[in-house]
Amino acid sequence: MPSEQSALPDFLFGTAWKEDRTPALTELALRMGFRGIDTANQRRHYFEAGVGQGLAAAYRAGVVTRADLFLQTKFTYQPGQDHRLPYDPAARLSDQVAQSMASSLEHLGTDHVDSYVLHGPASGYGWTDADSEVWEAMRKERDAGRTRFLGVSNVSLRHLEQMAVAHPEGPTFVQNRCYARFGWDRDVRLFCRERKIVYQGFSLLTANLQVLRHPVVTGIAARANASPAQVVFSFARAVGILPLTGTSNPEHMTQDLASVHLTLPPDAVNEIESLAG
Ligand SMILES: NC(=O)c1ccc[n+]([C@@H]2O[C@H](COP(=O)([O-])OP(=O)(O)OC[C@H]3O[C@@H](n4cnc5c(N)ncnc54)[C@H](OP(=O)(O)O)[C@@H]3O)[C@@H](O)[C@H]2O)c1
């Protein structure tokens, strides 16, 4: 991991599906102590300009400065968008990336983000020429100083292996949905570990409701005087996952952040890792 990345936070606050509550919840998350913010220039699921309003309110109130924050946003292909596009759909993909980035920076009121992520490859089956064009355009954005790091999301091991063959430079971040029943995305996590890519996991709670109720997890939680959700977040960190939470509840924000200080015994980590893999 590059040394400048020492400012990488322990948790990312996700801003999806918050609509009109996005400004207030973003500001609240910063007041509660989150320093990493995940969003996307995809109006269908995110209100990125609302995230910018929340940031601006927190700056005005003296809660944080831009330098305290890790801001991450994404480029989303047209099929993942609704009619509210952040680019000209007739433009070449490389121009769409530049337009989407310019729009993100305007929404977020900054001259650079910390991480810029390809929201998902064009095809579920493999890395395509379209993805290569987009990735090279993203690298240009990085070289121009508009993002510090690059990432990819919703990728399989196959995508990552093909991407590694097609490009001299791989991602700094991979952001994936993390299902316990697939060994917590074991194959992709292993690839990331070998290449020093930071794996970001989302839907750690919502994709794993059966795990939260499992006696192994509820037992570990009771012994640690913690909630099952906190155990899952602590487990995630123990196996090298940088977790996201999308909570809208202030008590859950406090609990989620407190999980940073919860250290599970190694046998508990092993038990959870092998629960559903
Ligand atoms: N790259 C992608 O394609 C992609 C896809 C999906 C999400 N994401 C990112 O990941 C973020 C998080 O999404 P997510 O799917 O992980 O979560 P989420 O669905 O936004 O919310 C997490 C769920 O867990 C609950 N929760 C959180 N903390 C809890 C706690 N301590 N105890 C009990 N319940 C708790 C929340 O309920 P309360 O609100 O009541 O707390 C909510 O129902 C998104 O906002 C987005 O930024 C990215």
Image (spheres, grey):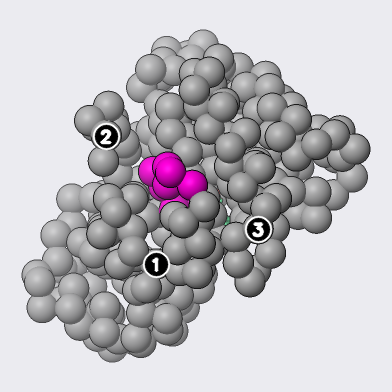
Measured in 3D between alpha carbons, the distance from the residue under mark 1 to the one under mark 3, in whole angstroms, is 19 Å
Q: Amino acid at mark 3?
A: Thr
Which residue is rendered at x = 36% and y = 22% of the image? 68
Question: Would residue 235 be found to the left or right of residue 85 on screen?
Answer: left
| First of labels 1, 2 by sequence position | 2
Measured in 3D between alpha carbons, the distance from the residue under mark 1 to the one under mark 2, in whole angstroms, is 20 Å
Question: Would residue 52 be found to the left or right of residue 266 on screen?
Answer: right
Q: Mark 2, mark 3: which one is toward the viewer?
A: 3
Between residues 257 and 173, which one lies in front from this camera angle?
A: 173
Q: Which of the labelled discs sits on residue 128, or is there none?
A: 3
Q: Position of residue 148 (x, y in %)?
A: 43, 27
Q: Which residue is mark 2?
A: 2
Q: Which residue is mark 1?
A: 188
Q: Position of residue 212 (x, y in %)?
A: 38, 77
Which residue is rendered at x = 60% and y = 17% of the image? 109
Query: Pointers 1 and 3 in contact (CB under 8 A)?
Result: no
Between residues 82 and 140, which one lies in front from this camera angle?
A: 140
Q: Which residues are magenta?
A: 167-177
| First of labels 1, 3 by sequence position | 3
Q: Secondary structure at mark 1?
A: helix
Q: Tell me if mark 3 has few (under 14), some (14-19) or many (20+) residues whose alpha carbon lies within 10 angstroms of its own.
A: some
Question: Would residue 166 be found to the left or right of residue 64 on screen?
Answer: right
Q: Amino acid at mark 2?
A: Pro
